[in-house]
């Protein structure tokens, strides 16, 4: 039997299982990139405004570290994609990591791949199928991005180059995940290692871009994300740089196949660290166990939120230099503020932080379903631990963790902003502005819990709801949607802080809705079968 036997069937199975999340991801990416490009063209209609704004971007070290430089200050395309370009590239890389780990190491860990392996499935078929699905998803995402950008008026050559860059970067990090999946036996550890590689690549690129004026611009060439950025869509179109990404992908893929041939099934090449023979006293409760399982993810998210807060706080003091046209000022003010451009900018960015906190909350709450399907919940529920108590353990992590992340971003942004403008009152203002996002985030978590209790197979509705609410928030102001449509999103009811009026009523209503959804979900979980 060929080592690749069954690859086609595994590809079809993976596409069948991931059809919803893949479609949702691609739609979001295409809409976000196209909407951002369209809005930027309207905000900076003339070359003078683009040059002035690009000069401000390239002169801000924090912005360069976060998003990279604008290589052509006169290009509307380069200005329109300098932010969403790098964010889209990172998103495609994360998707590729998720796909490969999910359909290789995760399948081995749960035992499903062993059942498939007993049929006509070759040893290399699972890895090959995962790489093909990840590459296909990246290619479709890239093609959709290119078509969407062209549709809103971006130059065709630059749009195609950006889309191909997304696809090549996805293939490269799929191969990275293929390697990490061979090194360790835990899917969570494999995903963490691959994510760490992506994080280092982002950091190295940021260092090179931020320190380019000091002669360290070459450092960004040590990162695959730096290679993507050096393709320079809409600013010179360096097609040849794509060869670096494809070469890196080929080397890492070959390494993954070599390592896969050298390890035992369901084992990793790196030795496992033996744990203690008995559990510590601090692990003698469901909440303690849930924290032990989720703490690494929380700390990683907290580090990201610290960086977001530092960047937002640092940019707030100089935001006026980025808004060089009356249309830009009016747009930012309409989106998030009432008193000043600075407050408007902070309100918009902290609103984005609320959405990111909801992403963490959904991820943490969905751990309930993953523990159940992996059959790790049943042994706990067979003891004196009740269903509701066990569910509350992971739910507490989701609720409290998302709130703490918003505290982190508020404190870090407030400290930097206070130092920038010389006003210690900024700390309190921005912490409050971050905290008002919590009830809306909890509503999203409530949707996940309700689905978990009533229809566990539809628990992914949490992602669908979050994506829908995010699109309403992003596109509502751009396309002048009616207020009734905008109000469907819980984030539409959050007071726009700082600069706006702190109204307690909508926050109380959102909290009540979240509590109701959670109660419904827990009641449903008590009555349904486990499994």
Image (cartoon, rainbow, N blue to C red):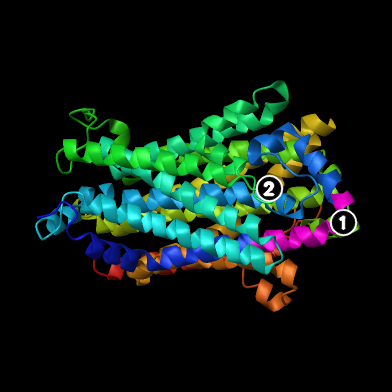
Q: In what element is the residue under mark 1?
A: loop
Residue at 55% over, 43% down: 240
Percent x, y of residue 499: 81, 52
Mark 2 nearby-residue class (10 Å; few <14, some 14–19, many ≥20): many
Q: Is residue 42 left or right of residue 214?
A: right
Which stretch appears magenta?
34-49
60 relative to 161 in the view: left or right? right
**Residue drawn at (80%, 37%), measured in percent from left and top?**
425
Residue 403 shown left or right of residue 377 in the figure: right
Magenta region, main secondary structure = helix
Q: Is residue 482 visible?
A: yes
Q: In which quadrant of the rendered view does residue 145 lie? A: bottom right
Q: Is residue 508 visible to the viewer in this orientation of the structure?
A: no
Q: State which quarter of the image contains the N terminus.
A: bottom left
Q: Is residue 20 magenta?
A: no
Residue drawn 32% across the image and 39% down it: 179
Query: Can you identify the residue that label 2 sits on?
Result: 82
Between the residue at mark 1 and the residue at mark 2, the CA separation in whole angstroms equals 17 Å
Identify which residue, 445 or 319, lies in the foreground: 319
Give the residue number, with chain letter if any, for mark 1.
Answer: 46
Q: Earlier in the sequence, mark 1 or mark 2?
A: 1
Q: Is residue 40 magenta?
A: yes
| Total numbered labels placed on residues in the image | 2
């Amino acid at each position: 039997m060929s080592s690749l036997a069954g690859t086609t069937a595994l590809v079809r199975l993976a596409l069948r299982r991931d059809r919803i999340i893949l479609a949702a991801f691609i739609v979001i990416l295409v809409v976000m990139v196209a909407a951002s490009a369209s809005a930027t063209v309207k905000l900076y209609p003339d070359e003078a405004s683009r040059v002035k704004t690009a000069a401000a971007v390239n002169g801000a070290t924090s912005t360069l570290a976060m998003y990279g430089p604008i290589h052509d200050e006169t290009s509307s395309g380069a200005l329109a994609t300098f932010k969403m370009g790098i964010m889209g590239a990172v998103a495609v890389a994360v998707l590729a990591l998720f796909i490969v780990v999910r359909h290789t190491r995760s399948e081995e860990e749960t035992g499903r791949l062993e059942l498939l392996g007993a049929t006509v499935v070759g040893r290399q078929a699972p890895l090959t199928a995962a790489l093909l699905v990840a590459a296909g998803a990246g290619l479709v995402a890239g093609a959709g991005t290119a078509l969407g950008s062209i549709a809103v008026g971006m130059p065709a050559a630059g749009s195609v180059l950006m889309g191909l860059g997304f696809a090549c970067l996805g293939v490269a990090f799929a191969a990275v995940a293929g390697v990490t999946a061979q090194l360790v036996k835990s899917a969570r550890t494999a995903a963490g290692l691959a994510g760490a590689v992506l994080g280092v690549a982002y950091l190295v690129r940021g260092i090179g871009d931020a320190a380019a004026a000091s002669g360290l611009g070459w450092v960004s060439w040590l990162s695959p994300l730096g290679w993507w950025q050096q393709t320079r869509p809409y600013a010179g179109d360096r097609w040849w740089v794509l060869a670096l990404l494809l070469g890196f992908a080929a080397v890492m893929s070959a390494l993954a196949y070599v390592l896969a041939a050298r390890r035992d099934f369901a084992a990793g090449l790196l030795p496992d660290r033996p744990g203690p023979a008995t559990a510590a006293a601090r692990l003698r409760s469901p909440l303690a166990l849930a924290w032990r399982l989720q703490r690494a993810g929380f700390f990683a998210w907290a580090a990201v939120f610290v960086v977001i807060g530092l960047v937002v706080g640092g940019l707030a003091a100089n935001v006026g230099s980025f808004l060089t046209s009356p249309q830009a000022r009016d747009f930012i003010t309409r989106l998030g503020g009432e008193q000043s451009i600075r407050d408007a900018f902070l309100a918009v960015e902290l609103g984005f932080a609320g959405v990111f906190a909801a992403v963490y909350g959904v991820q943490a709450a969905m751990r309930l379903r993953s523990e159940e399907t992996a059959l790790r919940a049943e042994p706990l529920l067979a003891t004196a631990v009740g269903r509701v108590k066990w569910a509350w353990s992971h739910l507490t992590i989701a609720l409290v963790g998302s709130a703490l992340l918003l505290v982190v971003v508020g404190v870090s942004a407030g400290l930097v902003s206070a130092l920038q403008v010389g006003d210690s009152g900024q700390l309190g203002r921005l912490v409050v502005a971050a905290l008002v996002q919590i009830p809306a985030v909890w509503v999203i978590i409530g949707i996940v819990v309700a689905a978990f209790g009533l229809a566990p197979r539809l628990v992914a509705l949490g992602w669908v709801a979050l994506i829908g609410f995010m699109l309403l928030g992003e596109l509502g102001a751009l396309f002048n949607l009616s207020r009734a449509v905008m109000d469907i999103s819980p984030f539409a009811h959050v007071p726009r802080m700082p600069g706006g009026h702190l109204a307690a009523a909508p926050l109380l209503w959102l909290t009540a809705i979240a509590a109701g959804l959670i109660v419904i979900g827990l009641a449903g979980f008590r009555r349904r079968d486990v499994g």
